[in-house]
Image: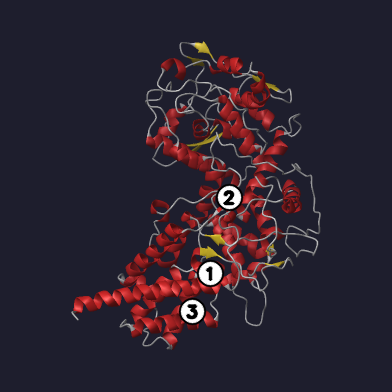
Amino acid sequence: MKAGNENMVRASSLSSLLVCGVVAAFGAMACNGAISGEGMTPTGNMTGSATGSGNPGTGLVPTGPGAGGSSGGVTGAGGAGTTASSDPGRISIHRLNNLEYDNTMMDLVGVPGMAEATFQPDEEGTFDNDADAFTMNDARYAQYFNAADTIGETIFSTPALQAKIVTCTPTAATDTCTATIITNFGLRAWRRPLTSTEISGLQTLAGSAITLGETPTNAIKQVVKTMLASPEFLYRIVFDQNPASLAVHAVGPYELASRLSYLLFSSMPDPTLFQLATPAAGSTTAQIQTDATLTAQVDRMLADPKGANFTNSFAGQWLGARTMQGHQVEPTAFPNFSEPLRAAMITEQLMYFDDFLTGTLPFTQFFTAQENFVNTALATHYGFGTPTGTAFQKVMNGSPARVGFMGLAGFLTQSSYSYRTAPTLRGKWILLFLLCQTIPNPPAGVPPLDMPNTSTDPLVQEENVRSRLEMHRQATACASCHATLDPIGMGLENFDAIGKYRTTYAPGVPIDSSGVLPSGETFQSLPQLAQIMADPAGKGMHLQQSTDCASQMMMTYSLSRALQDSDMPYLNQVRQTWSGQGWGLKPLLKDIVLNDTFRFRRGETATAATTTTSP
């Protein structure tokens, strides 16, 4: 046989070896529990679309600032432990989403994962980290398998990358060096210590590679590829001795480290978290399981550059910045709109949220804070003075007409049509995503407000929308919903479909931005509307609804699953604690991390219902 053919046979054998290694890994997982939620229909709608029919508030009872309290055996927010009558909920086996996969691969081996750019899009529930929404199919797994093979080759063809894994010189599959490499890499790749059986199985895999002609070092390569294509890497798995038991018990220290890391970093634990998750000699608990350590880690991780992933992912979805990335703007209506301006709008939305998360502003000022974050492009768009330098700068009181989140150009643009404002959509977006209200679907047969193919018509682009909506509301089937949706949107009409301030429609028709909310409260402009939304004594209870909604959204994201009725005592508890802390978003995040529903879990019986009442 020719040497070339020998190499082909050898490569084919090693490929088969990789397949067998991965199959063996899947088999091992099957002995410890099934993948929960695979194939289920995603619930909720939190993609940021203003036109979505999802309902962030269905089935959740608002409790308001200071209301609620613990019930059902829930203990303090510090997580002192649950009682048998409490139900902290289950933890689904969680496939890494594309962002998490890319970040984890980069942190683990220093090679980009490219999942966001090339893999199948993630399924989405309320957020894109909803474990119950995720599925696995042949095509998706083929992408993971091929990526593991390609990345393994890249690592072992790059001396600096290989040296981070192969820290000694292996001479045989059973020697101490090979076991050490597998143990150390396995801890990081599978985010927990490997069992002796797992180490032995991977050594056997290395031995098979050596038998096929690989060097001991290249045998390690086959082990690395197998581990990167294994369910223990691709999934965040919480193992239970009895997965069907409903007994409440604490999340293990390594599982807790991963839960915290994927919440704040969207990636694997860093060395500090691994160290904190390792119990000291003779101890059965780890530092990470204490209140003081968890709160200190929230502070540390948000201050880390990777902490920006929390804002980019959570706020990017909740507040619509991701939607803004693909929002279409009609060039005939807005010739001055540009991609740099779009990027600036997205950056400002995220910086605005981050100022509430890491700064001193209370969330109760989310509608009223007179601050903007601008670069030259956005400052020019707003009509502010041009800032010095190229970085974004914080501007206070830039314009008396532009206040709070509703005055941000990114929000105003993403909640508009491509060619004109859409007061109904703007109002619906605020009600859905900042107040978590239930919005019924429109009745069947309602004609569209604009005729098709009119987006380039200048008369439609500059039309008096208020008069059009008043005619639309004359239809009985439309009146009740539009009475709720339109007032907030009409209060924003002084801002066009890319968030630029204006006082008239063409040709010079004055804009009327006044309105009456269903509660009877009246306003003449955005600043007055914002004050109503932030009034703790307001008839419409909008401030209470907004704080309730913020806590609901953050807990949903933190738990990586839709909320259920059993979560309500915990959510109420978080709200009650938060109400006494000045309404900062970081204290809210800490309250959720310390809560029993984040730190404890139960199993799930085979017949357990999967229907939720989540957002």
Q: Nearer the viewer, residue 16 or 122?
A: 16
Question: Amino acid type of disc 3?
Answer: Thr
Q: CA distance from mark 1 to mark 2?
A: 29 Å
Query: What amino acid is labelled 1 in the image?
Result: Arg
Q: Residue furthest left?
A: 2
Label 3 and label 2: CA atoms lie apart by 38 Å
Q: Earlier in the sequence, mark 1 or mark 2?
A: 2
Q: Which residue is mark 3?
A: 183
At which x and y percent is residue 179?
A: 46, 83
Q: Which residue is mark 2?
A: 41
How far, Cα to Cα, is label 1 from label 3? 11 Å
Q: For mark 3, does the 10 Å Cα neighbourhood hold few (<14), some (14 to 19), or many (20 or more) residues?
A: many
Point out the frontmost of discs 3 and 2. 2
Q: Amino acid at mark 2?
A: Thr
Q: Is residue 461 visible?
A: yes
Kindly check if marks 3 and 2 are in contact, taking CB atoms under 8 A apart as contact.
no
Badge 3 element = helix
